[in-house]
Image (spheres, grey):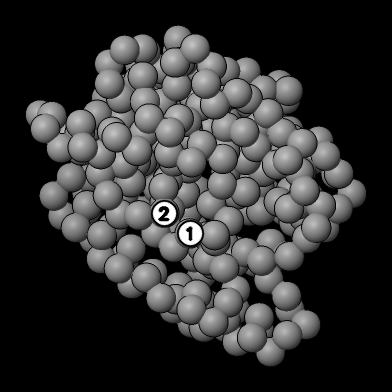
Amino acid sequence: MGLIVAVANQKGGVGKTTTVINLGACLAAAEKRVLLVDFDPQANCTSGMGISKSRDGLNAYAVLSGAALVEEAVADSDLPHLSILPGSISLAGAEVELAGMEEREFVLKKALAPVKEQYDYILIDCPPSLGLLTLNALVAADEVLIPIQAEYYAMEGVSELLRTLERVRESLNPDLAVRGVLLTMVDQKTNLGRQVSSEVQRFFGDKVYHGVIPRNIRLAEAPSFGKPIILYDIASRGAQSYLQIAQEFMANEC
């Protein structure tokens, strides 16, 4: 299949990294071949998978700069079928370096092309900005998954992301589609949680996943142990929610 999905929202703290790790793990548990690409300079996806951020320079930055091929830099995880291209703080400088390159928006797309068909899904953890790293991810991607936190300013910035997607479609990647919208950190017991859910439903319609990700202590703890939630506590509400989302994700072929 070789489907590349960018997990993007320029707001920080909305659950992008949590979603990449745990959706990826649940897809791998369903025996899909999954590659996670940690494209955020904070490299939280890498540490959340229990992988060293240093790792002998074999990481996404080395791939972007041409010092390594993707297949050389990919690391295995504790789950069969799940691998990761680690992130690095060096990605923070990549924005400047990319600015001077020919076809600077296509660097990641070209790097992933040789391995795309080796995986069923490639999930890219985008940084919380709309700079050149995120632009590279959107150009490389077939589809975008948008996590939205169920909080007061949830929709703030989403319109800017959608304008960016439209610009990318116009000039760089005409087939880019929104795969889905995922509500995260939901507390359905509060009026606010219900209001945000209905607002997002009204805005995105059938693109919104039926499953939501609740606020869940076990989900918050898992990264500090370097484990996806299904390896840390599969009985938790967080794990069960991501297992449901993985089913929707696999059923939702655009």
Which class describes the residues within 10 Å of circle 1: few (<14), some (14-19), or many (20+)?
Answer: few
Q: Residue at x 45, y 30 (%)?
A: 88
- Residue 113, compared with residue 252, is above or below; it is above
Question: Is 12 situated left or right of 241 in this image?
Answer: left
Mark 1: which amino acid?
A: Gly
Q: What element does badge 1 sit on?
A: loop
Q: Which mark is residue 58?
A: none
Disc 1 vs disc 2: Cβ atoms closer than 8 Å?
yes
Q: Earlier in the sequence, mark 1 or mark 2?
A: 1
Residue 231 seen in render: yes
Which quadrant would residue 172 be assigned to in this image?
top left
Above or below residue 130? Residue 202 is below
Say which residue label 1 marks: 12
Q: Quadrant of residue 25?
A: top right
Q: Residue furthest bottom?
A: 191
Q: Which residue is mark 2?
A: 128
In space, the residues marked 1 and 2 are separated at their CA atoms by: 5 Å
